Image (cartoon, grey):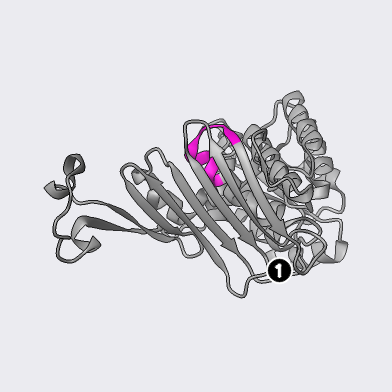
């Protein structure tokens, strides 16, 4: 494809607004316009961003090669299927769908329309993770904490689907092996749904991930720690920074199980090399949209395929079901 990719946005809430804002100046993209079922909101965004507003979804689809689906999760299927069946590619925000059946219908529509479907797990493009890529090597233990102050947004679903799904997708992509065991617990604190949850995932091959998500915290936190044979990564996903710690070369006291007597002067600092990690400043949402553009062009596969999005959804729903049905541990995801 040599012409600019015409990409529109369906749903102009908080996230959809930023998709529309960024798409206006992504190289190789022509902003096709927006559609929102709330006409007043669509008019506001049209005026603020100077983008074309379509009163009907069909009108936008007639003028777009691809769309970003940023409507509420319960409407993902209807919008995505309408686009995909007619060959309009779709970037669908996470979670992919409210149910696996809906996700399967979306995948079938993409196949029928020979269209690309990419799922918007934007943390894959986090600056800290991109900076850590050269040092990633067979993670064996991953621990994540995703905490947020209370907000009425998304309280119609459990925190597992609201927040934890980010880290479910991340650890799945980092480990790259099937989950064989789940242990989970959670508590509804301020809403009828679970507001704080913990899940322990065991992967084929021995890797383990411990995930905690809360929407009833006083402070925000988005941190992940990755332990592997070559060292230890500590990443702050909120500000795109981190560090990689590994054993310094040429320390004979730790070779072949030798005992350190006495402890080295300087403690851990004398044994470990600390490599600071700093993001490049690129906005993760922009990187995600650029990857979608490339997938639509056929230059590369989707960064997060529909199958991967379905896998993250399936695992997250399994965690939620164990909590909801008070089954804290199960070896059948």
Relative placement, left or right, of 331 versus 243 is: right
Q: Give the image location of residue 297, x and y in percent.
A: 58, 34
User: Quadrant where the C terminus lies?
Assistant: top right
In the picture, residue 51 is in which quadrant?
bottom right
Q: Nearer the viewer, residue 331 or 22?
A: 331
Q: Give the image location of residue 190, x and y in percent.
A: 77, 69
Q: Is residue 26 visible?
A: no
Q: Is residue 190 visible?
A: yes
Range of magenta residues: 170-180
Residue drawn 20% across the image and 56% down it: 271
Q: Give the image location of residue 182, x and y in percent.
A: 63, 41
User: Quadrant where the N terminus lies?
Assistant: top right
Residue drawn 73% across the image and 43% down it: 317
Whether 294 is drawn above or below 240: the answer is above
The magenta stretch spans residue 179:
yes
Q: Nearer the viewer, residue 80 or 31?
A: 80
Relative placement, left or right, of 148 versus 226 is: right
Residue drawn 18% across the image and 47% down it: 254
Relative placement, left or right, of 154 versus 219 is: right
Q: Nearer the viewer, residue 304 or 320?
A: 320
Instruction: Kindly identify which residue carries mark 1.
Output: 48
């Amino acid at each position: 494809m040599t012409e600019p990719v015409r990409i529109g946005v369906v749903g102009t809430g908080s996230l959809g607004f930023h998709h529309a804002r960024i798409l206006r100046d992504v190289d190789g993209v022509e902003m096709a316009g927006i559609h929102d079922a709330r006409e007043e909101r669509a008019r506001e965004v049209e005026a603020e961003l100077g983008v074309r507003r379509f009163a009907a979804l069909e009108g936008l689809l007639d003028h777009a090669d691809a769309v970003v689906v940023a409507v509420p999760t319960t409407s993902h299927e209807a919008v995505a299927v309408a686009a995909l069946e007619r060959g309009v590619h779709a970037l669908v925000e996470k979670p992919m769908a409210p149910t696996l059946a809906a996700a399967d219908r979306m995948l079938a529509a993409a196949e029928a329309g020979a269209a690309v479907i990419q799922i918007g797990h934007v943390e894959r493009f986090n600056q800290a993770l991109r900076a850590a890529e050269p040092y990633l090597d067979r993670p064996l233990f991953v621990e994540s904490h995703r905490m947020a102050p209370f907000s009425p947004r998304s309280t119609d679903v459990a925190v597992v689907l609201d927040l934890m799904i980010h880290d479910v997708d991340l650890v799945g992509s980092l480990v790259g092996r099937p989950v064989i065991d789940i242990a989970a617990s959670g508590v509804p604190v301020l809403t009828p749904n679970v507001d704080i949850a913990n899940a322990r995932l065991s992967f084929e091959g021995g890797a383990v991930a411990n995930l905690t998500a809360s929407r009833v915290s006083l402070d925000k936190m988005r941190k992940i720690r990755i332990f592997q044979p070559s060292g230890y990564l500590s990443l702050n996903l909120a500000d795109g920074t981190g560090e990689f710690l590994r054993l310094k070369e040429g320390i004979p006291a730790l070779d072949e199980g030798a005992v350190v007597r006495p402890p080295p002067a300087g403690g851990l600092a004398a044994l470990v090399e600390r490599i600071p990690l700093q993001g490049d400043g690129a906005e993760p949402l922009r990187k995600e949209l650029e990857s979608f553009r490339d997938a639509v062009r056929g230059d590369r596969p989707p960064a997060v395929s529909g199958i991967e999005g379905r896998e993250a959804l399936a695992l997250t729903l399994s965690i939620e079901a164990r909590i909801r049905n008070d089954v804290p541990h199960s070896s059948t995801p």
